Amino acid sequence: MGELVIGIDLGTTNSVVATVQGGVPTVIPNRSGYRITPSVVAMARNGKRLVGALARRQAVTNAERTVVAVKRLMGRRWSSKALRDTVARMPYTIVQGPHEDVRIVLGEQQYSPPEISAMVLTELRLDAEAYFGAPVSKAVITCPAYFNDSQRNATKDAGRIAGLDVIRIINEPTSAALAYGFGKAQSEKQVAVFDLGGGTFDFTVLHMFKGVFEVEATGGDSLLGGEDFDSRIIDWLAEPFLKAHGVDLRTDKMALQRLRDAAEKAKCELSAVTSVEINLPFISATQKTGPLHLQATLTREQLEKLTDDLVQRCLKVCEQVLGEAKVHAGALGEVLLVGGQTRMPRIQTAVKSLFGRDPSKAVNPDEAVALGAAIQGAMLLHEEQEMLLLDVTPHSLGIAIAGGFFQKIIPKNTTVPTSAHHVFTTVKDDQPSAKITVLQGESDIATDNELLGEFMLTGLRPAARGTVDIDVIFDISADGIVSVSALDVQTGARQSITVTASSGLTEDEIKKATRANEDWMLGQKEDPKFQDRKARAEELFKEFEAIWPRLTRAAQDGLGQEPLQRAQAALSVARLQVAQKESEGLAASIDRLERMLGALKGALERGLKEEGR
Amino acid sequence: MLAARDGEEAIDLPADIQRELRELESRGDRITHYELLSVGADADGGAIRRAYLERSKRIHPDAWYRKEVGEFGPLLTKWFQRLAAAYQVLSDEETRLVYDREHKGELSASDRAAVDKRELSRAEGERRQRERRDRLLHTKGFARIGAARKLYEEALAHVQNYERSQAIECLKAARELDPNRKEIVSKLVELEREQARARAKSALASGKEREDKKLWAQAITAYHAAFQLDPKNGAAAAGAARCFLWQDDAQAASTWATRALELDPADLDSRLVLAEAFIALKMKARARTELNNILSKDPEQAEAKALLKGL
């Protein structure tokens, strides 16, 4: 057994944390006992930070201070078109940040997307620490395969802010394939992973052989996921309402949050039944009409019609990736479905008709990604895991050249780590500096691709034009993260490079956020009253456990089930409060539990006396 | 701390891997792709891939992530990248063929024999396959549909094994047997296009290599071939134009530069070549037009400025 390491699936809607224990990949339940933690962060009215199920539960009444789907904002530039559409649909306020990036307004403060993600990660880290009973710092975090360099950096920054040593960022579909291939190391097989999560779509083709997982090709759409399916339902509900009553529910933050919840619920139910009722009473009100209600019936067929183009977009990506991997759809050994949205029957039939086979049910679509990340962590740190992952870069990397064109330097689907050189020559006499614009994407037009950064080659040796050659080296690490260095070819001197444009947080900002997060965690621990209350509550838990067998017997002998059920409910509330460090609430629960314990003990004693008589 | 700097930190990379990396280093650029992958030059696509994965397990940096690798760290990265690049070349039929042809002199005697043998056996295999296809082509009646399907499936198997040209032959026969099957035709078109692109790509690469070595005539031949295979390949036309200009054949240079510009009007380098060709041909007015065009898009273009001044 080596060092403790966790794998985290940091999802758009939900997150999961896992580890490999005794050679078995296992999901770590959170402190409330659930295997999935919603990726939701909220600032309650009293200024308290809420994360996970608690934050999600209060989203409707506190929509403006509840952050959902922050993953869609990770590493995005304020000016990017993709961001515009996302911003319009979010109930919380998004503003421009200091580096062309985005900030989320939450109460008095502004947070960057990595800081919000770090809150979710901190929660998961605490869950893991409660599970191990020991501190955890090493983690593997997953991200969509189609994430570009700035999105990956943002994910890594989030981990650092949460106090984690992120030993690797790995791609979600690859991770799911690791979970699938774990223990089947010897067989040779070609598998495809169809990963449609809350916010992103990825499609990856891998080849497995003797414990080596080689990614052959990957592709996707970082703005296509379950949330878009929900949005279609929201529009379908809101537009007729707008026509009938002249009220656009999507502009009312609380109504929008209720619509989101209702849409998601309807979508999930339609995977099992063919028609659902959507009922939203008092959704709005006008002076003239008084309160307004929304009622509709959505059928599965209708939903499929509303979202058909989204499904087609997925299939188009699949065909393109199969072409790049030079694989025929029918020739694959297995097709894995990952991500909650793949539960939709229409997706399953579409996948079946494209590949001519039933998708595999060997992996759990919600947990496979986190399990795979845990496996990758164990592969890197533990001696006994003889597995290796060969992943690829999902985007071509290149530079802007004269005329606004894009010159590819590292083509997409190149195995990482990789590096490439490009020689720049001065065009003027005694040219002191040169600018290099590094981009990622597939378009021949530079501005159509994602800008990674602008670098200045400074302090160039004064010489006639065309005589100074600078060899610029582009490296892509196994995390898919890009770095650039430069060398003067003639003198062999290392050339200095300054980053002049980048969308990420600065080193200082990350350090500051890390400190703030540490302070918050200390604050959580420092409430001395809470420590006392927690100790008392745990005593009570033990006492209840001790008399529980006698109580169940007494319940059958005339005491009845009801007092036991009440006690059970009070106990689980108290356990949750311990986990969420709700000091005040816990005090009230302790009072209640003490009273119950007294009454139950009394009842047991009376029962004994009666028996004795 | 000082002790560590003196190289006394315990490197726990297995001794055989250390030895292997030192050996690779000592051979440097003289190692062939086949030697790097530890396969004979007669290996087929599947064997090359398996060898690549097996070798990765030994020299991929992640395989030794938990170990103290010291000075070997950068070597692992470097040699893994070399390995991946070698695999890239040998895993495609076309690029492998070009590699075999151009590096025959560097291969060991046994590998050279293997390349020759593979060439022979490929010819032999292809001959046998051809005969079989001819027999199948004589199938009569409804059985033709079945025979076409069989050939189609064989083609897919060839694709899996990186034998594109074999696959194309199978599909051609299948199309003749059953011209109405859409998937046969579409797969055939796809593969033929892919083949042309792959050939154009390797022709372009060898053009560049020769241009770097200032072998203008040879480079022109390669660029010309690349352009023939993929008439949309502006880079090939631009390369030919450059080489002709170096050879002082301004007439040909202007023709090719014009072609390159037709394909990509924003290719300022080709426009510059065109301008220089016009100057050499004493067509000053046209040269001036081209140079002004360049400067309107990139006012900083120093060479264009200088040439314009000269005019």
Image (spheres, rainbow, N blue to C red):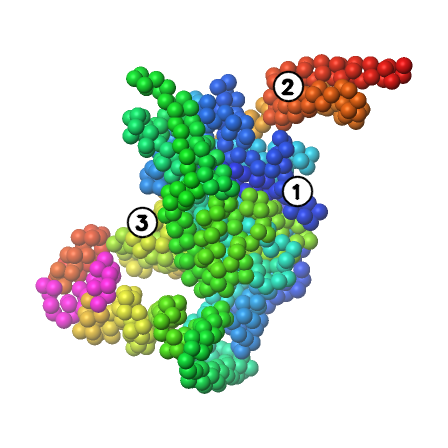
Q: Position of residue A53 (x, y in %)?
A: 55, 30
Alpha-carbon neighbours of circle 1 within 10 Å: few (<14), some, or many (≥20)? many
Foreground: disc 2 or disc 1: 2
Q: Mark 2 — residue?
A: A586
* Distance in Å between CA atoms under marks 1 and 3: 43 Å
Does the rendering let one see residue B214? no
Towards the viewer: A194 or A561: A561
**Chain that bears disc 1:** A
Does the image show residue A16?
Answer: yes
Residue at image coords 71%, 19%: A563
Q: Residues within 10 Å of mark 3 (few under 14, many from 20)?
A: some
Residues A593 and A449: in front is A593
- Placement of A314 over or under B172, stated as above or below: above
Q: Nearer the viewer, mark 2 or mark 3?
A: 2
Magenta segment main secondary structure = helix
Badge 2 crowding class, 10 Å Cα cut-off, few under 14, some 14 to 19, many 20 or more, is many
| The magenta segment | B259-286
**Quick check: do tags 2 and 3 share a chain?**
yes
* Mark 1 lies on residue: A4
Q: Residue at point 51% right, 29% down?
A: A56
Q: Amino acid at mark 2?
A: Leu
Mark 3 = which residue? A448
